[in-house]
Image (spheres, rainbow, N blue to C red):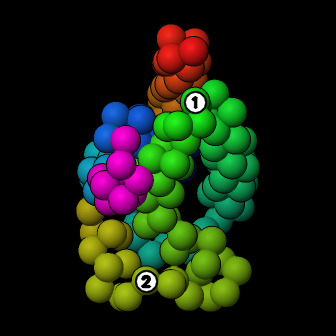
């Protein structure tokens, strides 16, 4: 699953739940729920990252950071903490990937990493669909946050 989709899910969860710790926990649960759906990725768990996967991962990661900034900029201050907590929770489980790339190991226990890998339904042919979905969700979520900000004064 693209990290941008996890960012958006976490933002919506945080905005709806309005309690940072609850939003972070629900965001983490949403991560695993989304990862259990068919999505683009390496079809074989534990496969070494190839050049295409790495380029997509870097672009997605940088886009995710930009999306977090956009969400933060359009979220009313009083709702910012739970929104950012939802985002953090929803993105946290994927810290294993950059940690493995840069440090050679995941920060999580092996049993969690193994379970996370087993629930993945990654397919190499879903990249375009996932990018279109993430772009559409971005427009909807940012428009919703802007409308909420205008409505709340």
65 above or below 47?
above
Q: Which residue position holds label 2?
A: 108
User: Which image quarter is the C terminus in?
Assistant: top right
The one nearer the camera, 130 or 83, is 83
At 35% from the left and 70% from the top, the residue drawn is 117
Magenta-highlighted stretch: main secondary structure?
helix
At 48% from the left and 43% from the top, the residue drawn is 83
The one nearer the camera, 76 or 47, is 76
76 above or below 152?
below
Tag shown at residue 24: none
Q: Position of residue 98 (x, y in %)?
A: 63, 71
Specify whether 116 is left or right of 72: left
Q: Which residue position holds label 1?
A: 76
41 above or below 152?
below
Q: Position of residue 7 (x, y in %)?
A: 52, 45
At 64% from the left and 38% from the top, the residue drawn is 72
120 above or below 107?
above
Q: Position of residue 103 (x, y in %)?
A: 67, 87
Count of numbered circles on the image: 2
**Mark nearer the N terminus (2 vs 1):** 1
Mark 2 → mark 1, Cα distance in angstroms: 33 Å
The one nearer the camera, 1 or 148, is 148
The residues colored magenta run 18-26
Choose top left, top right, bottom left or bottom right for residue 118: bottom left
Give the SS element for disc 1.
loop
Which is more foreground, mark 2 or mark 1?
1
Residue 135 can be seen in this image: no
Give the SS element for disc 2.
loop
């Amino acid at each position: 699953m693209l990290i941008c989709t996890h960012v958006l899910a976490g933002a919506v969860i945080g905005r709806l739940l309005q309690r940072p710790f609850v939003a972070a926990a629900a965001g983490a649960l949403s991560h695993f729920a989304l990862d259990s759906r068919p999505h683009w990725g390496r079809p074989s768990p534990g496969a070494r990252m190839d050049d295409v996967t790495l380029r997509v991962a870097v672009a997605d990661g940088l886009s995710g950071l930009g999306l977090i900034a956009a969400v933060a900029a359009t979220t009313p201050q009083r709702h910012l903490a739970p929104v950012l907590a939802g985002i953090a929770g929803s993105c946290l489980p994927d810290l294993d990937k950059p940690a493995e790339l840069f440090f050679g190991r995941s920060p999580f226990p092996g049993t969690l990493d193994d379970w996370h890998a087993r629930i993945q339904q990654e397919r190499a042919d879903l990249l375009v669909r996932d990018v279109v979905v993430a772009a559409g969700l971005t427009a909807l979520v940012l428009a919703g946050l802007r409308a909420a900000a205008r409505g709340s004064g």
